[in-house]
């Protein structure tokens, strides 16, 4: 029978109290693992860890932080084009990822400090939508000023495609990489 002890950890800025217990067991083909049980007034959850040196409370805290990581990835994919980059070089990809997470960090810090980047108040996704719209408008203004309306439609279309590629997020990341390497 597991012996539970009460522990309080900070989860997404709020104090949460759990009853936790753990025991190291041997699993055939896997070796020793630590089973961690956590109880709240509503639920009991069980976790396995191969990090035998950590306490049950430490393992639970790491598990709780995992949701923050999942949220960052989901928002990065949806709002920062995390999966849409078209870079091939390892260094360019690494720098692009760093830029995405830097942008995420700056917006998140501003949100926590109640700094309004845009007039309309809203959550992170609303603010990111405003930033994307502003970038799109500026890009369209720049692109339309570059293409002569007197050109035949096919030539205008070709020039527009080239300019859109120039102003894409991946091109922006590539130009950042080029500037850094100079």
Image (spheres, rainbow, N blue to C red):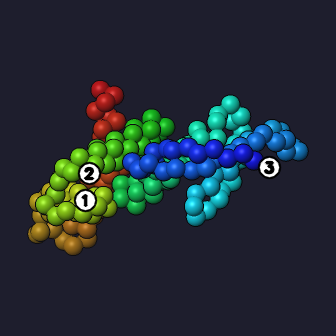
Question: Along the line of sight, which residue is nearer the eye, 182 or 83?
Answer: 83
User: Seen from this angle, which residue lies furthest top?
Assistant: 182
Count of marks overlaid on the render: 3
The residue that mark 2 highlights is 111
Instruction: State which mark lies toward you, 3 or 2.
Output: 3
The residue that mark 1 highlights is 127
Q: Label 1 vs label 2: CA separation?
A: 9 Å
Rendered residue at 44%/48% (across/down): 15
* Label 2 residue SS: helix
* Label 1 residue SS: helix
The disc, 1 or 2, on the residue closer to the chain's N-terminal end is: 2
| Residues under numbered marks 1 and 2 in contact, where contact means CB atoms less than 8 Å apart | yes
Question: Along the line of sight, which residue is nearer the eye, 144 or 118?
Answer: 118
Question: Along the line of sight, which residue is nearer the eye, 109 or 180?
Answer: 109
The residue that mark 3 highlights is 1
* Label 3 residue SS: loop
**Residue 121 at what x, y percent from top left?**
19, 62
Left or right of residue 21, residue 76 in this image:
left
The disc, 3 or 2, on the residue closer to the chain's N-terminal end is: 3
**Residue 179 at what x, y percent from top left?**
28, 32
Q: Label 1 vs label 3: CA separation?
A: 50 Å
Residue 24 picture quarter: top right
* Residue 106 visible in the picture: yes
Instruction: State which mark lies toward you, 1 or 2.
Output: 2
Rendered residue at 39%/39% (across/down): 98
Left or right of residue 47, residue 7 in this image:
left
Q: With respect to residue 24, does 153 lie above or below? A: below
Instruction: State which mark lies toward you, 1 or 3.
Output: 3
């Amino acid at each position: 029978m597991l012996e539970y002890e009460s522990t309080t950890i900070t989860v997404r800025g709020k104090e949460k109290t759990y009853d936790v217990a753990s025991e190291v067991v041997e699993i055939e083909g896997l070796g020793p693992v630590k089973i961690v049980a956590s109880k709240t007034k509503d639920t009991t959850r069980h976790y396995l860890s191969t990090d035998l040196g950590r306490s049950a409370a430490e393992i639970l805290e790491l598990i709780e932080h995992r949701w923050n990581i999942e949220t960052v990835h989901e928002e990065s994919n949806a709002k920062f084009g995390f999966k849409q980059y078209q870079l091939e070089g390892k260094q360019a990809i690494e720098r692009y990822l760093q830029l995405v997470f830097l942008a995420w960090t700056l917006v998140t810090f501003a949100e926590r400090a109640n700094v309004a980047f845009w007039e309309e108040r809203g959550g992170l996704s609303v603010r990111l939508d405003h930033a994307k719209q502003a970038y799109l408008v500026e890009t369209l203004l720049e692109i339309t000023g570059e293409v002569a309306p007197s050109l035949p439609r096919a030539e205008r279309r070709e020039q527009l495609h080239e300019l859109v590629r120039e102003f894409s997020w991946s091109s922006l990341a590539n130009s950042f990489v080029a500037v850094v390497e100079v």
